[in-house]
Amino acid sequence: TMVGYTGGLVRHPTYTEAGKGTNPHTEAVRVLYNSSVVPYATLLNIFWANVDPTNPNGQFCHQGPSYAPAVFYHTDEQKNLAVAWRARVSSIFNSSIRAKIRPASTFFPAEEEHQFLYLKNPEKFQEMVRQCNRSGTLKN
């Protein structure tokens, strides 16, 4: 996996550039996988279980357009699966699902300090998770 940015206007944006409202990049995770080992539906299940799909403005304490939840697809089959999963998730919530399903565009890797942050700085990562009440939000 690799974290980075997609969907914006600037090529090879920095973290600061990606977060600006005038440069509509979305922070994203690129996942390379073998579909004969891990089906795309499994990746969708992991995605939907780890985001707040009802918040169109971000995730947990990270707010702003670059943090809005989205699934990016490469094929019509992936798109159809993502739409079906969104409908399944919608039946669970009493609120409309605001996560977008968008065609994949060029992915730009984030700066090295953002890659594998949870391994490089586990204390900082855990503090961020705690402050954002991520676990409490996901349980609800």
Image (cartoon, grey):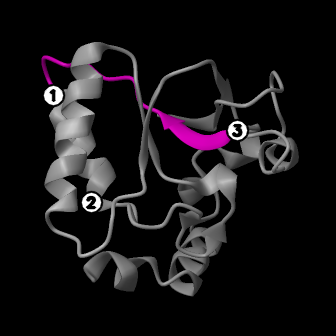
Instruction: Say left or right for 73 vs 4.
Output: left
- Count residues near mark 3 (Cα–Cα under 10 Å), then give few for <14, some for 14-19, many for 20+: many
Q: Which residue is depicted at the point 81% across and 50% down?
A: 21
**What is the span of residues highlighted in magenta in the rendered image?**
25-37
Earlier residue among tags 2 and 3 = 3
> 85 above or below 105?
below
**Residue beneath the point at 59% across and 80% down:** 127
What type is the residue that disc 2 sits on?
Ala
Quadrant where the C terminus lies?
bottom left
Distance (Cα) linking label 2 and label 3: 23 Å
Pointer 1 residue: 39
Q: Which residue is mark 3?
A: 25
The kind of residue tagged 1 is Pro
Expressed as whole percent of the image width and height from the top left, the position of residue 74 reads: 39, 16
User: Would you say 22 lies left or right of 48 here?
Assistant: right
Q: CA distance from mark 3 to mark 1?
A: 27 Å
Tag 3: amino acid:
His
Asked whether the residues under the numbered discs 3 and 1 touch, taking CB atoms below 8 Å apart as contact, a structural biologist would say no
Q: Which mark is residue 136?
A: none
Q: For the stretch drawn in magenta, what is the main secondary structure?
A: loop
Foreground disc of the pair 3, 1:
3
The residue tagged with tag 1: helix, strand or loop? loop
Q: Are marks 2 and 3 in contact (CB under 8 Å)?
A: no
State the residue at coordinates (84%, 50%): 20
Residue corresponding to mark 2: 49
The quadrant holding residue 54 is bottom left
